[in-house]
Amino acid sequence: MAPFVETKPYGVTDQPDFLNTVAAVETDLEPLDLLHALLATERQMGRVRLRHWGERNIDLDLLLYDDRCLDTAELVLPHRDMQNRDFVLQPLAALAPDTVHPVLGKTVAELWQDLRGRTKDAAAPGTDAPSAGTGTPAP
């Protein structure tokens, strides 16, 4: 498991900061079965979905599953926006920097560097680069 990272909310910003991490797991479950197990765990922990990207006590996402690609109504692998989310890439780069994104063909470390560069450029006056919140280590 990677170190925890505390970040500002993503998407809906009128809520408390998030505490994020990633973990590598070994499983015999197929991707959709693993997703269902993650969602069941969220429900058991009391997660209630009131609004998209809203407050939650737990949020378990399936980001990667080896080098498999999947695009269904229920699950997209790899996670379709992980390359734009610092709260995903920062801990993932700490855990598995050499893992290659199966669609983009870049390592997690490269994706994290790219995002940090875009975030830095977005902060510079006169740029139109997309921005993303920056994570800070949780206390």
Image: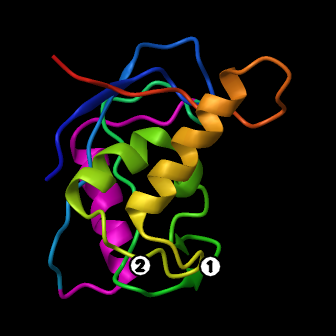
Local secondary structure at mark 1: loop
Is-magenta flag for residue 38? Answer: yes
Q: Crowding near pointer 1: few (<14 within 10 Å), some, many (20+)?
A: few
Q: Amino acid at mark 2?
A: Leu
In magenta, the rendered stretch is 28-50
What is the quadrant of the C terminus in the image?
Answer: top left
Q: Count the numbered circles shown.
A: 2
Residue at the location (60% across, 30% down)?
120
Residue 112, given in percent of the width and then of the height, sits at 46, 51
Q: Crowding near pointer 2: few (<14 within 10 Å), some, many (20+)?
A: some
Residue 109, given in percent of the width and then of the height, sits at 39, 59
Q: Amino acid at mark 1?
A: Thr
Residue at the location (22% across, 40% down)?
45
Is residue 63 at all visible to an observer of this figure? no
Residue at the location (61% across, 33% down)?
119
In the image, is residue 13 above or below residue 85?
above
Give whichever of 21, 34 is nearer the camera. Answer: 21
Residue at the location (30% across, 63% down)?
97
Q: Dot 1 corresponds to which residue?
A: 72
Give whichever of 103, 74 is nearer the camera. Answer: 103
- Locate residue 3 relative to residue 63 in the image: left or right: left
Main SS, magenta region, reads: helix
Q: Which mark is residue 32?
A: 2
In the image, is residue 44 above or below residue 77?
above
Is residue 32 at all visible to an observer of this figure? yes
- Looking at the image, tell me whether mark 1 or mark 2 is earlier in sequence order: 2
Tag 1 and tag 2, C-beta contact below 8 Å: yes
Local secondary structure at mark 2: helix
